[in-house]
Amino acid sequence: MATDRFSFSAVIFDLDGVITDTSEFHYLAWKRLADELGIDFGRADNDRLRGVSRVRSLEIIFEIGNREMPEKAEAEKLAAKKNEWYKEYLSGMSPNDLLPGARRVIETVRAAGVKTALGSASKNAPTVLKRLKITDLFDATVDGNDVGKAKPDPEVFLLGAQKLGVDPSLCVVAEDAGAGIEAAIRARMFALGIGTADGVEKAELIVPGLGDLELEELETRFKAWRGGRS
């Protein structure tokens, strides 16, 4: 059910690139693994890993190296090694690592009675939320521990809507990656694009950062989007 101020009932936020930015930590950990494997992996290659699962990221790295993906057990060991390095880098995170305006936007929609959820591919999302001290800003969380299908499959967002008890058509998804925008579209949710990554141009509304979002503009765009689908 919509609130008095907004026509949408929930906002589902991606984590990395929307609320905080751990992309450098991911890059450093994947780069470290690629170097160990003898695969040339640079920052441009890292862009291909945005918004996809850990296993798929590993597959992409082997594709970049023109190498055959190892057997499942070995692949899991490599992915776990990368994750341990990534968690080492995360250990220094604090609320100072929130992106500008992120807390304000989340708190504002919550104050208006809009439900909030996190919808992230990361299995480390609970750790990141804890270090940022924003766990209590979400009515529900869905992360890589909860879903078996990576974005652009809509599973993560549909499960978020289910946990919130909100119809998908009344949900806004804030995403910074093309795979996430596609997942939102497949879930038949309003896609709010953050930044300029490839694929974000498919969103219904695009802003440079979450802190740049004007909620009244979002309401106007959402109402028009809903009207066009009725």
Image: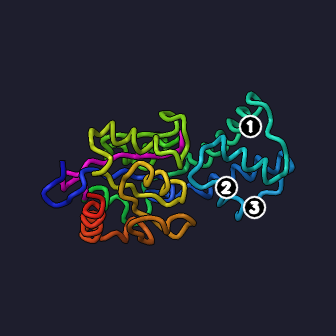
Q: Check the image and report above or below for 136 versus 6.
A: above
Under mark 2, the amino acid is Tyr
Say which residue appears at 83% left-offset and 52% top-offset: 65
Q: What SS does tag 2 mark?
A: helix
Report x, y in % for residue 99.
44, 62
Residue 96 visible within the image: no
Rounded to the nearest angstrom, the CA distance separating label 2 from label 3 is 8 Å
Q: Nearer the viewer, residue 116 or 71?
A: 71
In the picture provided, is 4 more to the left or to the right than 192? left
Report x, y in % for residue 213.
34, 69
Q: Nearer the viewer, residue 217 or 140?
A: 217
The total of numbered circles placed on residues is 3
Report x, y in % for residue 35.
82, 51
Q: Which residue is mark 1?
A: 78
Under mark 3, the amino acid is Gly
Q: Check the image and report above or below for 212 versus 124.
A: below
Q: Tell me if mark 2 has few (under 14), some (14-19) or many (20+) residues whose alpha carbon lies within 10 angstroms of its own.
A: some
Q: Nearer the viewer, residue 36 or 49?
A: 49
In the picture provided, is 109 more to the left or to the right than 143? left
- The outermost residue toward the left is 4
Q: Which mark is residue 42?
A: 3
- Asked whether the beta carbons under mark 3 and mark 1 sit within 8 Å of each other, the answer is no
Q: Which stretch did the figure color magenta? A: 109-123
Q: What SS does tag 1 mark?
A: helix
Mark nearer the N terminus (2 vs 1): 2
Q: Tell me if mark 3 has few (under 14), some (14-19) or many (20+) residues whose alpha carbon lies within 10 angstroms of its own.
A: few
Rounded to the nearest angstrom, the CA distance separating label 3 from label 1 is 18 Å
Quarter of the picture holding the C terminus? bottom left
- The outermost residue toward the front is 230
Residue 16 visible within the image: yes
Mark nearer the N terminus (3 vs 1): 3
